[in-house]
Image (cartoon, grey):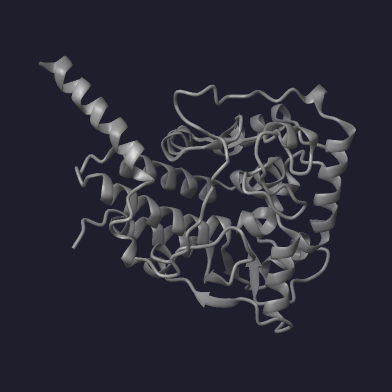
Amino acid sequence: MQNVFCWFVLFYYNKLITMVAQSTKYDHLFSNLIPNSIDGIKIFGMDDDYIKPQIYDDVTNLENRIWSELYQNLELLLNQYASREYLLGLKTLPIPNNMFPNFKEISPLIENATGWTLLPVAGFLDEELFFDINKKRQFPVTDIIRRSPRFDEKYSEMEIQNKKGYTPEPDIFHDVQAHVPFLMNADYAEFIWKVGVLGDEIIKDKRMLGPDLISHNLKRLQNFAWWTYEYGLVKNNGTSDRFRRVPNDIDYEIYGAGIISSLDEVNNVVDCAKERSPNSKFLPYDIEEMALTCFDYTHIQDRYYIVESMDGLYDSFKKNKELFFFEGQ
């Protein structure tokens, strides 16, 4: 009887995972609903060979030049406008501005600081695998970089955007230059771990909400993640300027990795904050609104949510987890 029960749960669970991306039953509850697509992107799951160790000696001069150009174009801007957590994390890690970072040099330092390690992967991971990895305090990073021959080779059989400022698949520059420095901060690292645990709880559906609500609640969590640790801003209270070469002259600091890894996005934040552009609006942090607001990852963001402090972000997430277990109406 126990074996039959376990087989049924496994079958039901796998079926839920298959159906998650397809359900749109509760999409009417979302605002800014945009038909995003990742057609053509290779997505790796639990049953795939998704671990891909970095072979540092194979990094080419061209790849190092691409990294250098991306990094150095952003270096001074980020020093002036990125958040305190980012600046301190970057300062303590061997992430060079002129060549590929070596995962084996970085990972032990993060593990010593916050218990996280880097896990080299082959590319884009599905939700089940991503949250499972995060729950283990492992952060997936890829060794491929935009505009490189290796990237072109990976997608040789299909046409995909592969530009200096944008690619739909996260690359080493986004993963390591933008996300990894934050993992040196204990409070931030704990926050990211709790997001991973929550995502895993939603997928495993211990509350038996069913595939439609799993899909809906995962989209809520995805929206929250997008507007916070991918594209979030925190109020500038002036205390971070002692870590900068030039004082921050706008009302915000950047903590969203999607902004940090994009020159166009950083410039957009600064231009809008200085009222040189009306392209995007700045909105007060509202976790319910953010969870129900969809996004477009193919364009510069039309809005940014401002949290009063990073501690306020962590506390808000802790107190509002039930928002991601919507039971239907």
Q: What residue lies at 68% left-to-right and 71% top-to-bottom?
A: 269
Q: Position of residue 209 (x, y in %)?
A: 21, 47
Q: Position of residue 240 (x, y in %)?
A: 69, 65
Quadrant showing the C terminus: bottom left
Q: What residue lies at 83% left-to-right and 64% top-to-bottom?
A: 245
Quadrant showing the N terminus: top left
Q: What residue lies at 53% left-to-right and 50% top-to-bottom?
A: 188
Left or right: where does residue 275 sit relative to residue 208? Answer: right
Left or right: where does residue 70 sit relative to residue 127? Answer: right
Left or right: where does residue 274 sit relative to residue 129? Answer: right
| Circle count | 0
Displayed quadrant of residue 207: top left
Q: Residue furthest left?
A: 1
Q: What residue lies at 25% left-to-right and 27% top-to-bottom?
A: 11
| Residue nearest the viewer, comparing 191 with 130 | 130
Placement of 265 over or under 19, stated as above or below? below
Q: Position of residue 95 (x, y in %)?
A: 77, 41
Displayed quadrant of residue 254: bottom right
Placement of 65 over or under 121, stated as above or below? below
Q: Position of residue 45 (x, y in %)?
A: 47, 30
| Residue nearest the viewer, comparing 71 with 16 | 16
